[in-house]
Image: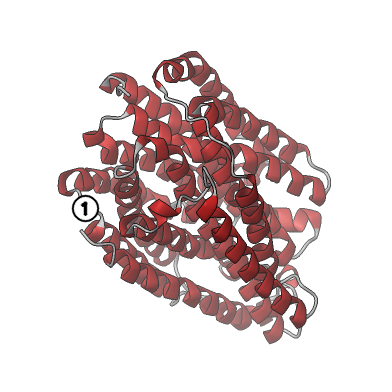
Amino acid sequence: MDKAPLTKSRFYALLIACGVLLSTMDSSMVNVALPEIMRSFEVGIGEVKLVVLIYLMVITFSLVFWGRIGDEFGKGRVYITGMVVFACGAVVCAVSTLFSLLIIARAVQAVGAAMMMATGPAILKFVSPREHLGKTLGFVGVATSCGLMTGPLISGFILSVTSWRGVFLVPVPLAAMAALLGSLYLLPDLRKREELHHQKFDWQGGLLWVGFVVAFVLLANGTLPHWYFNIVMILAIIFLLYLFFKVEKRAEAPILPLVLVRRRYYWTGVATAGISFGALFIVLILLPFYLDYILQYSPRRIGLVMMALPVSLVVMSPMSGWLYDRLGSARVISTVGLLISTVAVLCLLLLDGDSSFFGVCWRLTLLGAGQSVFLSPNSASVLSKVQDSYAGITSGILATARNFGMLSGTALAGTTFSLLYGRLTSGKSVLHFTHDYGDAFLFAQRSTLAIALLLLFCGCLISWSRGR
């Protein structure tokens, strides 16, 4: 298939970047708003994390569906529809008066986000010249950075003048504009250029994958009432994985092409993407509560601090994409990025009740730099090596890995912190935090961050093993 002219491909990259901006800005805004949502509905940290957890869970188990559906019916059509669904879910979130309705609306939002995530990078592969793919993905990395950077600032400002409900309305106008432009320009062009691949859908594999993700969330969330339920759930996860791989081996059009997963460049890229985002979200979930309860920052000040993480992404993402285009190998670049992230989390472990504004900011900036150096080359190293017929499903698998990492990081952060804090405070919830429990809070936070540190160390080893 012919690539689009460079000018047109840049315009399409801008439209894809809008979808990335929407999803990342939404996530970063909601993370800052979690303490306010917790107080509004009078729930604990174990419950309020569901606002993030359900969003990530639905994305994780539906991404592989949308990647395959994009290959079947058209990636542009799935992408534009996803934008509309995302905006509708955001509106319902804003008007929710019940916590349960908010959770359902977040699930709707997640469906739209999954549709965009699964098809966006695949569209870029089709419309961008191969020699510019790393740079194009780096540009999309800038959109990721801008979403993460502006989200906390916007959220902090909104929370200082109105309620958390306004946070969900921010992405709606941008989604409407991008959906309109995409329908007028991107969609007609892709219909002319795109080669659709009509294959029987792997429903058995898809349903087993959904079962696995739900079982994993139930286990990691720590909501099962007795220890023997945890044992049963672990056995169920192992059995579901066994059945999943058995089905995928004989499926005509598997949602997880094992022929690709066996290749070292493929599985190392997918695995490190999940590990990187798992560690990142452990930090993103914990830090707003640390800034609120320990340092007693206002919502606006919390937004300013959290903005430090993506500031470095704006500078480093294009640079890492350019380096990949020049060197053609992600082994050194992506491993260095994970190593920088490891050092950053090690420094975050040293935060205490007297840490300064600058002390928190430079640590988050270092973490953002590591993530940006890692991400673009890692994605480009996988997408550039697969056939066009596997572009959609590969895009979905990479996004699934990232979101599975986010899901795992969110679950681990909430569950580990809540268990440790509860044990040290005789079963108290963070909702009833007082300064008498400051040491317990910091111990629980450091112990949870140690998990992120271990994940990143393992990620460095896996990334280096990918070969040249």
Say which of 134 and 213 sits in front.
213
Say which of 188 and 238 sits in front.
238
Give the colour scheme shown.
Answer: secondary structure
Question: What number of labels is visible?
Answer: 1
Quarter occupied by residue 66: top right
294 w.r.t. 128: above or below: below
Residue 55 placement (x, y as % from top left): 64, 49
Residue 30 placement (x, y as % from top left): 61, 49
For the point 57% across and 63% down, the residue is: 408
Say which of 378 and 233 sits in front.
233
For the point 43% across and 77% down, the residue is: 350
Residue 417 placement (x, y as % from top left): 62, 74
For the point 74% across and 68% down, the residue is: 431
Please tell me how crowded label 1 is: few (under 14), some (14-19), or many (20+) other residues with Cα within 10 Å: some
Asked whether residue 292 appears in the rendered view, the answer is no
Left or right: residue 362 compared with residue 351: left
Residue bearing the label numbered 1 = 329
Quarter occupied by residue 442: bottom right
Residue type at mark 1: give it: Ser
Residue 339 placement (x, y as % from top left): 31, 67
Left or right: residue 131 compared with residue 391: left
For the point 28% across and 62% down, the residue is: 466
Quadrant of the rendering where the N terminus is positioned: top left
Asked whether residue 91 appears in the rendered view, the answer is yes
Quadrant of the rendering where the C terminus is positioned: bottom left
Q: Residue furthest right?
A: 98
Question: Does dot 1 land on a helix, a strand or a loop?
Answer: loop
Left or right: residue 85 compared with residue 257: right
Say which of 423 and 69 sits in front.
69
